[in-house]
Image (tube, rainbow, N blue to C red):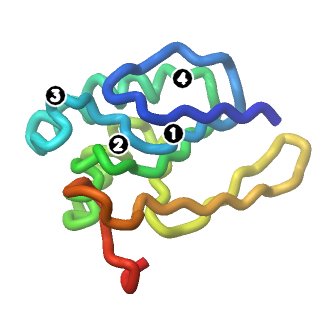
Amino acid sequence: MKILALSDLHGYLPDIEPCEVLFICGDISPLDIQSNIPKMQVWLRNKFASWINNLPCNQVLMVAGNHDFIFQWLTEHPEEMDFYIGKPTKYKLGILDGQECNINSEEGPVYKVWGSPYCKIFYDWAFMVNDETL
């Protein structure tokens, strides 16, 4: 099974090699619009979703990062997740928010992965929580 991992894209959406699974480990948001929720909504549904749909892989799993304020907003508005992520990416993209997910291999075994965007407070970024909450 070929697995690729990316992080800290900050709006750059590269071509990738064909693979079975792509992990995106946070910070997809372009820095110039990262905290502008309306602009990020448009970017997600259009540019990002188009990139996801055209990736040469079977599955994309993502954990949001500290620059991904749009995903913090989506955790507060879960009813919007399908509109901004599910439908535009044709359900190819899975967001891990403190949960596990199965990856099915063509060879048969199932791999379990777990992901969470939350981390210790070190600035005024997205997904920063205190030690007790962690």
55 lies above or below 7: above
Residue under the point 37% across and 40% down = 27
Q: Residue 36, position in %: x, y? A: 10, 40
Whole-number angstrom distance, CA of label 3 to CA of label 2: 25 Å
Mark before the other along the chain sequence, 4 or 3: 3
Residue under the point 21% across and 67% down = 76
Whole-number angstrom distance, CA of label 3 to CA of label 1: 20 Å
Mark 2: few/some/many CA within 10 Å (<14, 14-19, 20+): some
Mark before the other along the chain sequence, 1 or 2: 1
- Give the residue number, with chain letter if any, for mark 3: 32
- Give the residue number, with chain letter if any, for mark 2: 87
Which element type, helix, strand or loop, lies under badge 3? loop
Between tags 3 and 1, which lies in front? 3
Which element type, helix, strand or loop, lies under badge 1? strand
Mark before the other along the chain sequence, 3 or 2: 3
- Give the residue number, with chain letter if any, for mark 1: 24
Which element type, helix, strand or loop, lies under badge 4? loop
Q: Is residue 35 left or right of residue 119?
A: left
- Give the residue number, with chain letter if any, for mark 4: 55
- Mark 4 and mark 3 residues within 8 Å of each other at the beta carbon: no
